[in-house]
């Protein structure tokens, strides 16, 4: 299918959905757009303490919290 064919089919399907379902669909599409730009943050390394070497983690690049804020939470 071409992009235009897919877009036309989506429009046809959207016309049959209720407003609630359209809103859910929009939220899902926005989620998909956001998640395709997800990249693990490599800016700051944080020690894992006792879990060092046992687990891995990554923070989204727009995640902002200081160590002090984290410890207070």
Image (tube, rainbow, N blue to C red):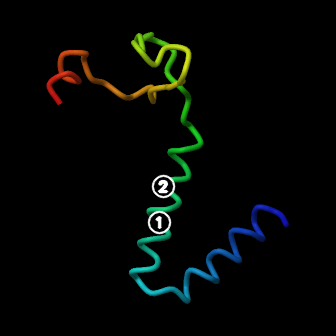
Q: Mark 1–mark 2 contact, CB under 8 Å? A: yes
Q: How many labels does the image show?
A: 2
Label 2 secondary element: helix
Q: Where does the image place residue 21, in percent across and percent down from the top left?
A: 45, 79
Residues 36 and 3: in front is 36
Query: What residue is at 47 percent from the left and 66 percent from the top?
Result: 26
Q: How far apart are marks 1 and 2 (CA)?
A: 6 Å
On screen, 68 above or below 59? above
Residue for badge 1 = 26
For residue 30, the mark is: 2
Query: What residue is at 46 percent from the left and 76 percent from the top?
Result: 22
Q: Where does the image place residue 14, in percent across and percent down from the top left?
A: 56, 80
Q: Where does the image place residue 2, in percent across and percent down from the top left?
A: 83, 63
Local packing at callout 1 (Cα closer than 10 Å; few below 14, some 14-19, many 20+) is few
Residues 48 and 65: in front is 48
Local packing at callout 2 (Cα closer than 10 Å; few below 14, some 14-19, many 20+) is few
Q: Where does the image place residue 47, in percent across and percent down from the top left?
A: 41, 10
């Amino acid at each position: 299918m071409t992009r235009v064919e897919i877009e036309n089919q989506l429009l046809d399907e959207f016309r049959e959905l209720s407003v609630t379902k359209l809103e859910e669909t929009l939220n899902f599409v926005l989620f998909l757009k956001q998640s395709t730009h997800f990249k693990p943050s490599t800016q700051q390394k944080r020690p894992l303490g006792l879990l060092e070497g046992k687990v891995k983690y990554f923070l989204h690049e727009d995640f902002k919290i200081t160590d002090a804020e984290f410890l207070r939470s």
